[in-house]
Image (cartoon, grey):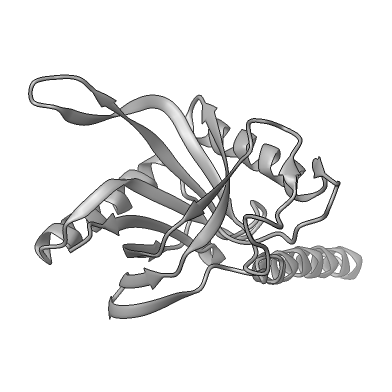
Amino acid sequence: MSKRQKMIAWVFIGAVALVVVGAAAAGPLMSRVEQPEYEVTSAEGSFQLREYGSMILAQVEVEGAREAAISEGFRLIAAYIFGANEPEAKISMTAPVQQQAKRIIEMTTPVTQQAKEGIWTVSFVMPKDWTIETLPAPKDERVKLTPVPSKRMVVIRFSGTADDKLIATKTAELTKYAADHDLSITGEPVFAFYNPPWTLPLLRRNEIMLELAAA
């Protein structure tokens, strides 16, 4: 290899390294936004028991495949916080964006609860300095503002690209952990994603949460 070729190779390697380092820094930096407050009451490896205070969610229901639904839901709620409201107020971005399968009650004998396939609730937690009275009204009627009471959650945290296969694996691990520790669960799993999509998989923060039933 000639001297000129070696120089070009080193420039190329340096450029690639710069892109990688930049991406590594961008993910956590872009995720340094307000997050819901909670108290960790127990921790074991990647599992935690958390107590969350009351909060307000901006929510939409979206029908379709999971990844397409969260993308559409994110778009609708982002439009709301960026000014698609009355009186076109700006609301700070928060993390994570949450996704949960919708449950319906089907009249059977006995009565059971069953997830309705293809309908997802996508949510942002509203910044804590807003109240249900002061939050601006959404212009899009699909966006709903929902007060949520305090609750206890069992959570698994993991990195990587949260595709359907990884989510299924981690949901099974969390469900087993809850069963092994005699934790009574209510509702569907909540998927929580904290980072923008360009974040390197190793640096991503993903969580799956299950609500604990009231004692």
Q: Looking at the rendering, in which quadrant would you find the C terminus?
A: bottom left
Query: Residue 118, percent across and down?
Result: 43, 25
Q: Nearer the viewer, residue 76 or 128?
A: 128
Q: Where is residue 119 in the image (x, y as percent from the top left)?
A: 45, 28
Q: Is residue 119 above or below residue 144?
A: above
Q: Whole-percent x and y of residue 72?
A: 63, 34
165 sits left or right of 129 in the view? left
Expressed as whole percent of the image width and height from the top left, the position of residue 196 reads 65, 55
Direction from residue 153 to residue 8 in the image, left or right: right
The number of numbered badges drawn on the structure is: 0
Along the horizontal axis of the image, is 83 left or right of 203? right
State which quarter of the image contains the N terminus.
bottom right
Image: 179 above or below 119 = below
Residue, far front: 133
Q: In this view, does 50 lie above or below 193?
A: below
Q: Quadrant of residue 214?
A: bottom left
In-front residue for pair 36/173: 36
Q: Is residue 193 above or below residue 10?
A: above
Residue situated in front as seen by the camera: 2 or 51: 51
Q: Which residue lies furthest to the right in this view?
A: 4
- At 30% from the left and 80% from the top, the residue drawn is 41
Q: Which residue is drawn at 10% across and 63% down?
A: 182
